[in-house]
Image (cartoon, grey):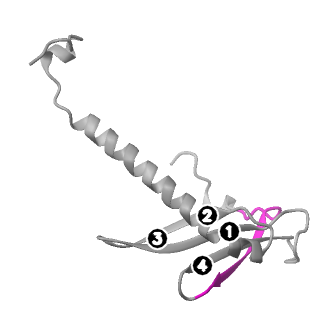
Amino acid sequence: MANQQPLEDVRIDAGNLWREENYTDLQVGHIRKLVPVKPDGSDDPARQPVFSATTNIMTPGGALPISGEIEASSLAEAVEKFPEAINAAVKQLQEEMIKYQQEQEQASRIVTPDQLRGRNDLII
């Protein structure tokens, strides 16, 4: 908490302003577009817009929101690349889940006194 700014020092970065636009087909998902703007609210052509995809996939535990970045320069291109972005996000989530499961398995292994002393060549 020591690195937090006092409330009177909190300021918006006027050189990094964005307008948010949302698009949906009311069935599969949403595309979010962040449009760079100047401090007066006009579009900033010196910076590129940023697109992201969001959808829900059904799991045994219920709906799971999935989102990912879309490499696109227009809304039409973002719509075309929507499936690619969602598939990449699902793949990344699967990899993270596998890694987490492996870490949990490693953490739950029973450690014998011989292993603690560095002798794991004994067969029990």
Reading the chain from its start, which is encountered first: label 3 or label 1? 3
Cβ–Cβ below 8 Å for labels 1 and 2? yes
Image quadrant containing the C terminus: top left
Q: Residues within 10 Å of mark 2 (few under 14, many from 20)?
A: many
Cβ–Cβ below 8 Å for labels 3 and 1? no
Work out how far the residue at label 3 is from the one at label 4, CA to CA, in angstroms: 11 Å
Q: Which residue matches tag 1? A: 81
Q: Residue sitting at 29 percent across and 42 percent down?
A: 104
Q: Is residue 94 left or right of residue 104?
A: right
Q: Residue sitting at 61 percent across and 64 percent down?
A: 85
Q: Residue sitting at 39 percent across and 51 percent down?
A: 97
Q: Is residue 23 left or right of residue 65?
A: right
Tell me the quarter of the picture where residue 35 sits.
bottom right
Reading the chain from its start, which is encountered first: label 3 or label 2? 3
Which residue type carries mark 4?
A: His
Which residue type carries mark 2?
A: Ala
Task: Tell me the number on the disc at residue 30.
Answer: 4
Q: Which residues are magenta?
A: 11-25
Q: Position of residue 28 (x, y in %)?
A: 54, 81
Which residue type carries mark 3?
A: Pro
Q: Is residue 16 left or right of residue 20?
A: right
